[in-house]
Image: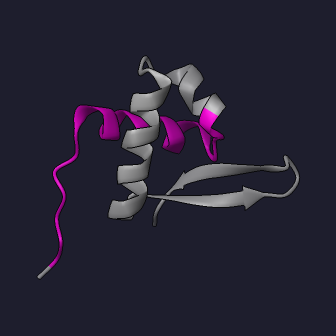
Amino acid sequence: MMDIHILSKEEKEIIKIIEEHGELTFDELKNYVKIEKPKLREIIAEMLRKGLLVKVPNFERGKFVYKVSK
């Protein structure tokens, strides 16, 4: 049986933004959403745990970026 997650409004918004703009750092993502930093960190951590997002190094930019899991 597949593990199906019900996405929150914020999770849907974050996925949509990353799909539109490509890989984003935390600060770039913060610029697109109206969510306070601590709350955004919690949401992202939960999305990483659920496997909705992946955090990968972007060596050209010297930062970690988030992208939507395939």
Expressed as whole percent of the image width and height from the top left, the position of residue 14 reads 42, 37
Depth check: give the residue in front, 65 or 21: 65
Compared across the picture, whether 70 is left or right of 2 comes to right
**Outermost residue, top side:** 34
Expressed as whole percent of the image width and height from the top left, the position of residue 30 reads 55, 26
Res 59 → quadrant: bottom right
**Outermost residue, bottom side:** 1
Counting the numbered discs, the total is: 0
Q: Is residue 48 above or below residue 8?
A: below
Expressed as whole percent of the image width and height from the top left, the position of residue 26 reads 60, 37
Compared across the picture, whether 1 is left or right of 55 comes to left
Task: Read off the magenta span.
Answer: 2-26
Q: Is residue 53 above or below residue 42?
A: below
**Outermost residue, front side:** 38
**Outermost residue, left side:** 1
Q: Is residue 40 above or below residue 60?
A: above
Res 44 → quadrant: top left
Q: Is residue 3 above or below residue 66?
A: below
Q: Quadrant of the N terminus?
A: bottom left
Judge whether residue 56 is colored magenta.
Answer: no
Judge whether residue 15 is colored magenta.
Answer: yes
Residue at the spot x=16%, y=51% of the render? 6
Compared across the picture, whether 3 is left or right of 29 comes to left
Expressed as whole percent of the image width and height from the top left, the position of residue 55 reads 58, 58
* Colour setting: one colour
Residue at the spot x=58%, y=21% of the render? 31
Residue at the spot x=52%, y=41% of the render? 18
